[in-house]
Image (cartoon, grey):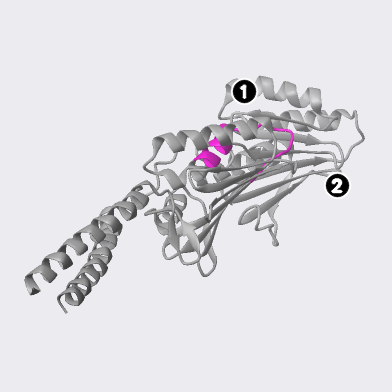
C-alpha cells in the first residue's frame, strides 16, 4: 500500500512537473526577434522613384513641343493605366504621322515615362535632331548633364542603345525607331 | 507514509519540470523559426508590420486573397514585387521578383531591396543577417541559380531568366 501510494505520488508529480516545466520553457524562452522589420537601407526603392526627376508635362508638351516646335498635344481619352493615370499625345505640324510623342503621367510633375517615335528612314537628320532635342528637354533641371546626354543621343540615334543620365534612363530602339525615357533607380 | 509519498511526488515534479524546461527553453531561445500550423514561420515579426513598412515607402500593396499579400512597385522598366504568405499573423514565405532590363547590372536600389527582404528572418541576429547578405550578393554577382539552407530557412535565387531576379525565403521543415 505504502509503495503504491508513493509510486502514484511520484508519477503524478512528474507529470505535473513536466507540464509546468515545458510551459515555463516555452514562455520564458521567447525566440529572438523584433515584431517590427529593420529600417530600410538608403537606396531602397520608393514610390517617388516612379517619376522622371525634374520633368513635367508642361516642360515637354507645352514648352518644348508646342511652343518651340508648333506641335499639338491632347489628352488621350483611353490612357494606358499601367503606365499612369493620364496620357498626353503630341503630334507634329502638317499631319506628319512619322513623328509623335506620348507622355504617361499621374500629374503635371509626376511623369512616369515618355516616348518619342521617329519613323523616318535610318540616317535621317530628322530623327537625330528630334532625339537630341528630347534629351536636352529631359535634362533642363540637370543642365550639367545636357552635353553628355545630347552627344549620346546623336551618336546612338540609329542603333539599339541605352544610357542613364541623372536618374533618367534613355533607350533608343531601331524597330520601331523610337527613344524612350523612364525613371531609373 | 503520506509524508514520504508527498516528498517523493514533489521530487518527481522537480526533476521532470527541470528536465522539460531546459530543452524547451534552449530550443526556443536559439530557434530562428517557430511552428505555425503545418509550416514554420519567422518568429515574432508581424506580417502586417512588414506590409506597413513597404506601404510607407510608397509600394502599393494588395491582399490578393486570405493571408496572401502582394506589393508591387513599378519604376519605368523596373518592377519590384514581393509576395508574403501570412500564417497566424506571422510570415511563412517571402517571394521576391525584380524585373529589369537584361543588359543592365543590378543597381544599388535592386540590391538594397533584395537584401532587406532576404534578412527579414533575422531581425535580432547580426551574424546571420551578414551571412545571408553575403550569400545573396555573391549569388547575384555570379549570376547563377542557387539554393542553400541558412539559419533554418531555404533560400533560392534564380537569375537564369534574362531580365529578372527571383528570391524566395521559406522556413525549412524538419
Q: Nearer the viewer, mark 1 or mark 2?
A: 1
- For residue A132, above or below residue A59: above
Residue displayed at 69% across by 53% down = A74
Output the chain of dot 1: A
Q: Is residue B171 magenta?
A: no
User: Element type at marker 1?
Assistant: helix
Q: Is residue B6 above or below residue A49?
A: below
Which quadrant of the rendered structure holds the C terminus of chain A? top right
The residue labelled by disc 2 is A97
The mark that comes first in sequence, 1 or 2, is: 2
Q: Which residue is mark 1?
A: A145
- Category of crowding for the residue at label 2, using alpha-carbon neighbours closer than 10 angstroms: few (below 14), some (14–19), many (at least 20): few
Q: Split into 4 quadrants, where in the image is the N terminus of chain A?
A: bottom left
Q: Nearer the viewer, residue B107 or A47?
A: B107
Residue at the location (92% across, 35% down)?
Answer: A121
Q: Which quadrant of the figure has residue A182? A: top right
Q: Are marks 1 and 2 on the same chain?
A: yes
Q: Residue at x 64, y 23 (%)?
A: A146
Left or right: B95, with B15 as reference point: right
- In this view, the residue in front, A45 or A69, is A45
Q: Specify the quadrant of the image occupied by residue A99.
A: top right
Q: Is residue B100 above or below residue B51?
A: above
> Looking at the image, which residue is at 25% across and 54% down?
A28
Q: Is residue A105 left or right of residue A93?
A: left
Q: Indicate the position of residue A31 as horizontal and vertical percent values.
A: 34, 51
Disc 2: host chain: A
Residue A150 visible to the viewer: yes
Is residue B114 in the magenta section?
Answer: yes
Instruction: Where is residue A141? Give x, y as percent.
Output: 56, 30
- Within 10 Å of disc 1 (Cα), the crowding (few <14, some 14-19, many 20+) is some
What residue span does the magenta drawing correspond to? B98-115
Amino acid at each position: 500500500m505504502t509503495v503504491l501510494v508513493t509510486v502514484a505520488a511520484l508519477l503524478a508529480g512528474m507529470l505535473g512537473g513536466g507540464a509546468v516545466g515545458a510551459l515555463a520553457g516555452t514562455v520564458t524562452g521567447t525566440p529572438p526577434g523584433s515584431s517590427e522589420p529593420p529600417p530600410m537601407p538608403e537606396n531602397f526603392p520608393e514610390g517617388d522613384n516612379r517619376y522622371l526627376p525634374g520633368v513635367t508635362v508642361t516642360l515637354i508638351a507645352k514648352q518644348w513641343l508646342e511652343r518651340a516646335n508648333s506641335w499639338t498635344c491632347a489628352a488621350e481619352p483611353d490612357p494606358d493605366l499601367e503606365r499612369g493615370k493620364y496620357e498626353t499625345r503630341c503630334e507634329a505640324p502638317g499631319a506628319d504621322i512619322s513623328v509623335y510623342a506620348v507622355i504617361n503621367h499621374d500629374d503635371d510633375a509626376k511623369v512616369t515615362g515618355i516616348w518619342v517615335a521617329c519613323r523616318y528612314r535610318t540616317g535621317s537628320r530628322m530623327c537625330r535632331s528630334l532625339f537630341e532635342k528630347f534629351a536636352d528637354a529631359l535634362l533642363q533641371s540637370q543642365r550639367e548633364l545636357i552635353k553628355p546626354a545630347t552627344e549620346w543621343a546623336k551618336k546612338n540615334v540609329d542603333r539599339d542603345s541605352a544610357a542613364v543620365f541623372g536618374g533618367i534612363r534613355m533607350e533608343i530602339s531601331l524597330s520601331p525607331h523610337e527613344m524612350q525615357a523612364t525613371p531609373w533607380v | 507514509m503520506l509524508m514520504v509519498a508527498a516528498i517523493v511526488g514533489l521530487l518527481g515534479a522537480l526533476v521532470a519540470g527541470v528536465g522539460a524546461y531546459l530543452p524547451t527553453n534552449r530550443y526556443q531561445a536559439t530557434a530562428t523559426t517557430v511552428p505555425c500550423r503545418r509550416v514554420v514561420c519567422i518568429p515574432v515579426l508581424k506580417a502586417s508590420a512588414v506590409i506597413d513598412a513597404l506601404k510607407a515607402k510608397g509600394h502599393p500593396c494588395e491582399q490578393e486573397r486570405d493571408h496572401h499579400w502582394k506589393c508591387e512597385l513599378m519604376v519605368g522598366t523596373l518592377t519590384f514585387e514581393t509576395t508574403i504568405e501570412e500564417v497566424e499573423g506571422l510570415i511563412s514565405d517571402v517571394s521576391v521578383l525584380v524585373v529589369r532590363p537584361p543588359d543592365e547590372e543590378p543597381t544599388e536600389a535592386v540590391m538594397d531591396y533584395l537584401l532587406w527582404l532576404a534578412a527579414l528572418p533575422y531581425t535580432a541576429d547580426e551574424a546571420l543577417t551578414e551571412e545571408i547578405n553575403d550569400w545573396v550578393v555573391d549569388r547575384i554577382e555570379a549570376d547563377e541559380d542557387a539554393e542553400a539552407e541558412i539559419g533554418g530557412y531555404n533560400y533560392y535565387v534564380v537569375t537564369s531568366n534574362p531580365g529578372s531576379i527571383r528570391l524566395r525565403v521559406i522556413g525549412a521543415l524538419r
